[in-house]
Amino acid sequence: MVVRISLILGVAVLLSIGLVSGISYFEIARTTKENSTIRIDRAAKTAAAVIRYGTDRAIDPTSDENGKPQVLTLTALYNGPADLRPNALFDELVLAIGKSNQGAANIFSYSEKTGLFDRIATTFRKPDGSMPPPFAIKPGHPAYSNLVNGVPFIGNVPVQGRLRLAYLMPIVDGDRALKGAAAVDVGWADDLTVAQNRLSARLFTAAALVLFAVMLVGGILLRHQMMPLRRLAAAAHRLASGEPQASFPCADRPDEIGDLAHGLARVTELQERLHKLAYVDPVTTGGNRTKYFADLADALERAAVDDKKTALIQLDFIGFAKINDTFGQKAGNRVLMQTYTRLRRLLGESANISRISADDFCILLPLDESGELSADYAANIIDVLSAPFQLDEGEIRVDPLIGIALLPQDAHDAETAHRVAGIALRAAKDAAHQQHMFFSAPLNDRVQSEMLLETRLRTALATGQLELHYQPQVNPANGDLIGLEALIRWPDGQGNWIPPCDFISLAEKTGLIIDLGHYVLDEACRQAAHWLTTGFEFGHVSVNVSPIEFQQPNFASNVRKVLERYQLPSHTLCLEVTENVFVDTSERLVLDLLFELQSMGVLLSLDDFGSGYSSLSYLHKLPFQELKIDRAFLQDADLYPQKKQLYQAIVGLGKSLGLRVVAEGAETEGEYLLTVGLECDSLQGYFCARPLPAKDIPDCCLSIGEALNSDRLQSIRKRA
Ligand code: C2E
Ligand code: MG
Ligand code: MG
């Protein structure tokens, strides 16, 4: 920069010096020329006068209107022929001319034969009076062509290797034939040229000196002036390479450089704001997803380069969505903020804590040499987060789950590390009594086989390999058919069925349950409508609904559409949900949906009652018509009095709430008789029938009726 500006300055100075000195040089040259012309003019006129009067018109000059002699005409000479030969008169004449114009004069005779002008008289006599060496004007001499054409010449002519400013006139005879030439001069012409050249040399030296001085001083000044700019540029470079800049030099200057420093300071602020937007989670003030992946990449690089070990902990809460649904997003955000604060307090500043989505936190915790994270430490995290959160709305509890991967032991790249920690977290979700889980190879195998199963299930669903079987629900007292439960069946291609428990939870995890649910509802309704047209009275068809389906905002409208599609009376459809619908969804939303379905006339059944998240407090508020007691309560209840009493109590509870009580899973006659004795409204179990393809159902139902009304069973029932 400095060099370039110095160069530009130099060129500018050079141009101006060149211009000024050029003008002066040419002015001097012009004046010199004018001066010379005046002098030679005067010398020529004087010479003409001297010749005219000195020779008494024997040599008569002819002049132009300005009096400048053009040609000398030779008529006759005293004492001699009218031609040009060495002659005393000529010697006198040249001396007289030389005196009058303080220059020199020469006379030449022209020889037509040689074409040369030879000197015959000169003022340049040697001190001893003798003539200097002969001198001839030959072709190539500046005046030669003028003279042979009878025209005078003014200019510099070479004499003894130097130039003289001379005026040469042709001499002709009376017949205008060329006889010779007369030359007068005013001195050495190159005196002027030398003076001119000296001037130009001095001008050049002066210009070079000025130029050098300007470039030197200019360069130093510029360098000095550029110093703040250079410091600012260095600060800008540091800023660009991500080094935080607390302040910028020269910010206090009141000029453009100060403005530039302020501009850079604003860029820093902007950079910080952008950094925040890009890396900070606004809810918790911890890292966000981008920051997490950047930290993860750093941690893996440190692991590879410095052998530093890190634990990657993924955290999720069960039922977090419920907080948002029930208390609003602000309350949910406060829980997230407190989670972050608790984690920070427990794990210290060295941990990188980021929230990557809703309630999913990812933590990178530096480990010691061993590269291990103790189970106690993991349990500590769980404990800290299990403590109730204090909100304005009251005390809230959520169940934390964590999955842990150890780096670099479990993964060497960010994608794998994130995936394997996720596998550990999912395993913790699946495990019944384990809130934290470390990643391990068997877990990985399990996930891989699940992935395989998922692909197969997707294909099965897409290619219509799935089908529905139906299991009758009958009145245990008389065998009347009350309903049919639709149960999904997946043939394995080798004549066996893959049981729903092997793929329903997977379908729920992967979201496939939505498509699967659509298929089941549609197919069950289609079949029911078909049975109605054939006159087979089946009561109702029950369809199992997963909590995931229940969370779909368009669930109710989809049910309505399917009923309309098959023109199926709504009371012939029963939807079975388990208590798990309340786990991850707010009670309010579940209730709204249940009431909407009830208003449509669809029957609602609470399935597997007592097996999971049971809260008796809400049972009376819910619009269920049916309570299906989980099979576990009936199993062997006829054999153990305490079990029997428990079962009896549950049946009593259902009946007291006005619900139709369904006994699930009666396998033995004893269990069957128990349901009769406890006056269960409905029975579904292998004792009556296993789930069967639709085509076998009508016959099967007939034979159940016959079996239950057989004399033997009737008499046993009477006795009981
Ligand atoms: P669930 O809704 O409680 O269905 C009753 C399950 O108990 C059925 O098992 C049935 O075959 C079985 N069962 C009935 N009587 C007896 C018995 O006497 N002894 C024994 N040991 N079992 C009996 P399945 O078909 O294997 O279905 C298991 C679970 O899978 C179902 O439990 C339900 O939660 C789920 N499921 C089945 N089909 C669907 C479906 O289409 N959609 C959804 N979301 N879940 C389904
Ligand atoms: Mg069911
Ligand atoms: Mg059940």
Image (spheres, rainbow, N blue to C red):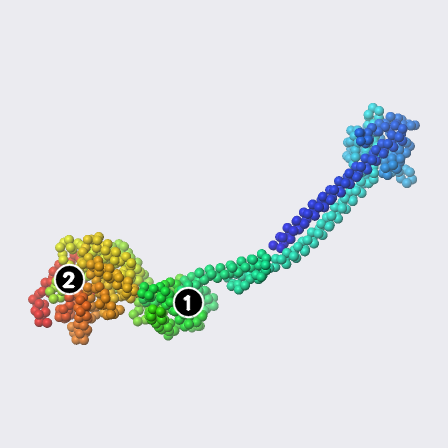
Tell me the tag on residue 482: 2
Name the residue tied to disc 1.
353
| Residue 413 placement (x, y as % from top left) | 42, 63
Kind of residue sitting beneath label 2: Ile
Whether residue 485 can be seen here: yes
Classify 10 Å Cα crowding around label 2: few (below 14), some (14-19), many (20 and above). some
Q: Of residues 232 and 501, which is closer to you in this image? A: 232
Disc 2 within 8 angstroms of ligand 2 (CB): no
Placement of the N terminus among the 4 image quadrants: bottom right
Residue 157 visible, this orientation: no
Q: Horizontal and vertical percent for residue 511?
A: 30, 60
Disc 1 under 8 Å from ligand 1? The reply is no
User: Is 474 placed left or right of 70 in the picture?
Assistant: left
Would you say 488 lies left or right of 151 here?
Answer: left
- Specify the amino acid type for callout 1: Ile
Q: How far, Cα to Cα, is label 1 from label 2?
A: 56 Å
Residue drawn at the location 24% of the way across and 59% of the way down: 596
Answer with left or right where residue 653 lies relative to residue 291.
left
